[in-house]
Amino acid sequence: MVINWPFNKSYCMSKTIVAVDTRDLKKGKTGTHTYLDSFCTEFKKINRQEDAEIKYYFITYYLPVYTGKNSIGKIVEHLLFTLWKQFFIPIYCILYQVDILFCTDYFLPIMPLPTKKVVVFHDTFFFEQPNHYNRFWLKTFHLFAVKAAKNAAQIIVPTKFVEQKVSTFIPEVTNKITVIYEGPKYFDTILNQPSPKDFSNSKINQIEKWLQGQKYILHVGTLDYRKNLLRLIKAYQLIPNKHTIKLILVGSSPAYKTSNGTQELEAYINEQQIQNQVLLLGSVGDNLLGHLYQNAFLYVFPSLNEGFGLPLLEAMQYQIPIAAANNTALPEVAEKAAIYFDPTSVEEIAQKMALLIEDEAIRNELKSQASERLQCFNWEKSAAQLNKLFETMVAQR
């Protein structure tokens, strides 16, 4: 693993150096990947500013990241991850006299360093849903992540909801938590792509053939039990005019067996013989994802627990009317840009979906609210806020 210094060293000595651990970019394109990738994009823009007080240094992990299901592979991956965080990262910080280390994956080096450490907690699932993680990973989290958080200079969280949760589980860190909202995924180029009818993509053609000209409800996210997708499918079956609209679920299976609801969903769809109405599409690329958002009639988010909920912003970006669970961080993020339901009630989920299907006035109002609400979420604004925090931290030394 070799790190190339990206700037002229004598020039950088007059700057504050923030090192960003980019290992998460090796993993699947989940919300945490989008989070890190979006911040890196903005940090690179700051690096191009001659008068910027801070220069960003991206620490690249050159080994592959194992995401399979083999137990030995998982153990090796955990060991390599621990070695990376607790050995290689500290060496790099010392070697390059890094002022601030920024890690977006809950974990920091626990050894004392002259470098100030900042970590991101996207949620508190490790505390709330320990049965969804294997024992080795849980021990790693409590041994390293919780201890490091207590010694961190700052903890970044995506919502006030997560701020409250982190304060509850780790009360010692309450006074050093900063809320920085996320932004929608960069779909700028996708928005300018031709429509699916003109786009030569076999997958899109297959979906169009399956839809047979009908509208569809969209959900994007891993097929995790937490996402509450079985209730969503059952609620969809209760919609009176379900034969005029279909349901597309986009997302891959989660890494952990105990949280993987894929087989249960597949079994239910087969048992009910609704393959022609409900489509499990799996993971898709940004191009196809952009087109799915662009043409969706409704977006439904029935999750039981979310630290933020990036797909809400993506749906707002495409002016899709949203129905969402009335829990955790979702009302904080969407506010008036969604209608809400009790995610434990199949009947209520169905009622809200039916309402949006039938009431054009409500759909139009939600689209208007989405345009207004989306102004609060912008990666450039988020990066500027984080950059300002780094400047303040150095000034306080």
Image (cartoon, rainbow, N blue to C red):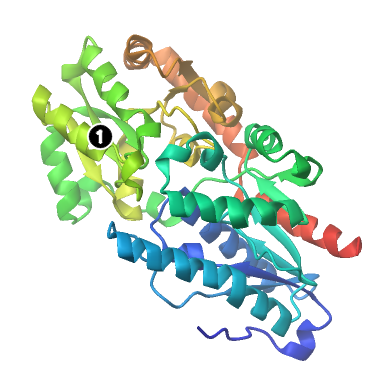
User: Is 153 rendered above or below residue 331?
Assistant: below
At horizontal 32% and vertical 54% (from top left) the residue drawn is: 287
Give left or right: position of 345 versus 166: left
Whether residue 260 is visible here, answered yes or no, is yes
Which percent across, then down, holds residue 238?
Answer: 24, 12
At horizontal 81% and vertical 42% (from top left) the residue drawn is: 175
* Quadrant assignment, res 251: top left
Whether residue 186 is visible here, answered yes or no, is no
Which percent across, then down, holds residue 221?
Answer: 37, 41
User: Is 43 rendered above or below residue 335?
Assistant: below
Which percent across, then down, holds residue 77?
Answer: 41, 66
Give left or right: position of 346 versus 134: left
* Quadrant assignment, res 12: bottom right
Looking at the image, the residue that sits furthest to the right is 396
Q: Which residue is mark 1?
A: 248
Secondary structure under tag 1 reads: strand
At horizontal 76% and vertical 44% (from top left) the residue drawn is: 173
Give left or right: position of 114 versus 160: right
The 10 Å Cα crowd at callout 1, few under 14, some 14 to 19, many 20 or more, is many
User: Is 138 rendered above or below residue 68?
Assistant: above
Which percent across, then down, holds residue 186?
Answer: 48, 53
The C terminus lies in quadrant = bottom right
**323, 329: nearer the viewer:** 329
At horizontal 32% and vertical 64% (from top left) the residue drawn is: 72
User: Is 32 rendered above or below residue 346?
Assistant: below
Give left or right: position of 37 versus 204: right
